[in-house]
Amino acid sequence: MEKAVIYREKEEFKEVHLVLKNATSKQFYEFSFEMEDFPNIKIKSIGNLQETGLTFENNRLSGIPHANSIHDLDIEFFHIHDENSTEIKKVHLLVNADPKDLWKNIPSDINDDYYKPDEASYKGKFSGKKITVVSKRGRSHAHEGKFRDDDFAVDELFGGWSIVSVADGAGSAIMAREGSRLATISVNRFFSSEEILKGIEKNIETVYNTSELSKQSKARENIIRLMYEGVLYVYHTLDQAATEHSFSIKDFHTTLIFALIKKFDFGYVILTFGVGDCPINLISQDFSEVKLLNQMDVGEFGGGTRFITMKEIFSDDPASRFGITCVNDFSYLVLMTDGIYDPKFMTESKLENIDSWKTFFNDLAGNNDDRVKVDFINDIHIDQQLLTWTDFWSRGNHDDRTLAIIY
């Protein structure tokens, strides 16, 4: 009778329709065998795993499959009352192709007069903190051998000031890649002036060390005026470049955001500007609060973002595009283009949702399909880690990706 029961339970397990969930090549995979319906059956090993890239341990398949294929696996199992007699159950594992492999990666033309590397990265010091910035050509551009239209620039300036600027060239503009490059380097160049920084700093001291509201208000106006002059300088730089090379300024269409920062005795002063759909976010020291520091050109201008090359942005309440923020300290200051914003946040409202940011930094910490981790503690290779992370897969989101993090 006991042998009959053992035989029946083994045959039931052998005959049950067991379906392994599909895997995707180059992406982490795991599958646990639920054995509640077969309490007397134990899986000893799984054969033919060497070709898959997976391992089996504690009733769990896991690992990163090498390539797309259909694998025939042999489940070797036994009955707990007959451990010396093992049998084989055959199952199939389907490994789908990695969607990334379906996209071409054609190098851009290195001989072009306006050649730009397909990716760039940076790490360094920044106003008493650290910074890392990466910019990567999107799959849509790589598939056609086009250039990266995003760009960034970072500079340490006079008197402890630092600036980071990020730009996203318009895909419809034939010189967008040069527009974004010129926008970032020219705004940084403007604020490299010792005279301008001293003027800004003098007014900041008035804002935060004077109790008279009228003087504070006037000092704020002076700060915004100097920042406005910097943005206007960017416009004229792009306009001049277009004229000199027989282009229209529309051919240089680009968004622009920047953060100009210094640590004072009373805290960090963060001066910001934004035109377009790229956000600047400040996360509090204890990660309990997040603020969007710039005006986003979404919603009202749905689908047609605004650019630094549009003269009208200098007439429709330009002061609303500038921000003056002072905090004792912060954990992160983040600037990004829509190649990051769209897949990771999707809507503007989530940019001011702290849970969305916790999810974002969990993703950076390695909680993602590629198991890519960006280490902000042991940060020797943080720029390369972040550059690898930006290669994440997001269906329908294949734009250039630029991300700057001050930490």
Image (spheres, grey):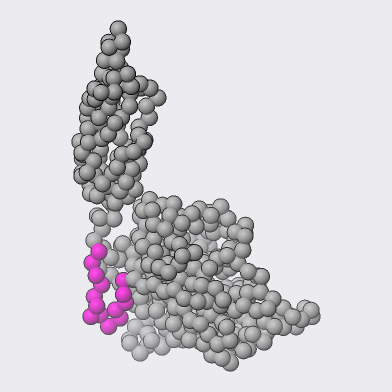
Residue 369 among magenta residues: no
Rendered residue at 33%/86% (across/down): 246
Out of 205 and 287, give the one closest to the viewer: 287
Determine the residue located farthest toward the top in the rendered image.
1
Report the side of 1 relative to 374 (left or right). left
Out of 50 and 341, give the one closest to the viewer: 50
Determine the residue located farthest toward the front in the rendered image.
84
Determine the residue located farthest toward the bottom in the rendered image.
195
Position above or below: 347 against 79? below
Res 134 quadrant in image: bottom left
Rendered residue at 58%/86% (across/down): 159
Q: Is residue 219 something one can see in this rendering?
A: no
Q: Which residues are magenta?
A: 105-118
Position above or below: 143 against 218? above
Rendered residue at 62%/77% (across/down): 263
Q: Return the x and y of residue 141 as percentages of the image width and height.
A: 30, 66
Q: Is residue 43 something one can see in this rendering?
A: yes
Position above or below: 286 against 166? above
Q: Return the x and y of residue 309 as percentages of the image width and height.
A: 45, 78
Out of 154 and 216, give the one closest to the viewer: 154
Q: Return the x and y of residue 270 as percentages of the image width and height.
A: 60, 74
Position above or below: 363 against 380? above
Q: How many circles with numbers are drawn on the protein?
A: 0
Report the side of 383 relative to 44 (left or right). right
